[in-house]
Image (spheres, grey):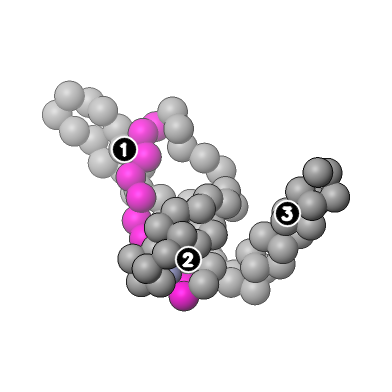
Amino acid sequence: MKVTYRNSTQLFLSPCHCMSCGKVFIVPRLRFSKRESGHVKTMFCFNCKCDQDFIETKNGTQFEFEYWKQYIEHQKQKKAVAS
Ligand SMILES: [Zn+2]
């Protein structure tokens, strides 16, 4: 999905999935900061009322909750080993 303003600023709308409650928030992004599908970010979930891990996917990408849950666990383990 693409939004173009009159000043030709392009915003892309990325769905971000809360890994705790599964709620999806649509986050607008500027073109140059657009990320690949599967980017993990921590932000405030209005449903959980606290910070949660979110998975950002591209529009049209099927969201596999279990897959991403394992993905996040894997990332955390890697970080734990590295530090
Ligand atoms: Zn949540």
Q: CA distance from mark 3 to mark 1?
A: 29 Å
Q: Residues within 10 Å of mark 3 (few under 14, many from 20)?
A: few
Q: Which mark is residue 18?
A: 2
Q: Is residue 17 visible?
A: no
Question: Dot 2, how many residues are within 10 Å of its Cα: few (below 14), some (14-19), or many (20+)?
Answer: many
Amino acid marked by disc 2 = Cys
Image: magenta residue range: 21-31
Nearer-N-terminus badge (1/2): 1
Q: Secondary structure at mark 2?
A: strand
Name the spot of residue 43 as percent of width and height, x first.
44, 54
In this figure, what is the number of numbered marks?
3
- Three-letter residue code for mark 1: Leu
Disc 2 to disc 3, how far (Cα)?
Answer: 16 Å
Q: Residues within 10 Å of mark 1 (few under 14, many from 20)?
A: some
Q: Secondary structure at mark 1?
A: strand
In the image, is residue 27 part of the stretch drawn in magenta? yes
Amino acid marked by disc 3: Gln
Residue name at image x 47 percent, y 73 percent = 22
Residue 35 sits above or below residue 46 on the image: above
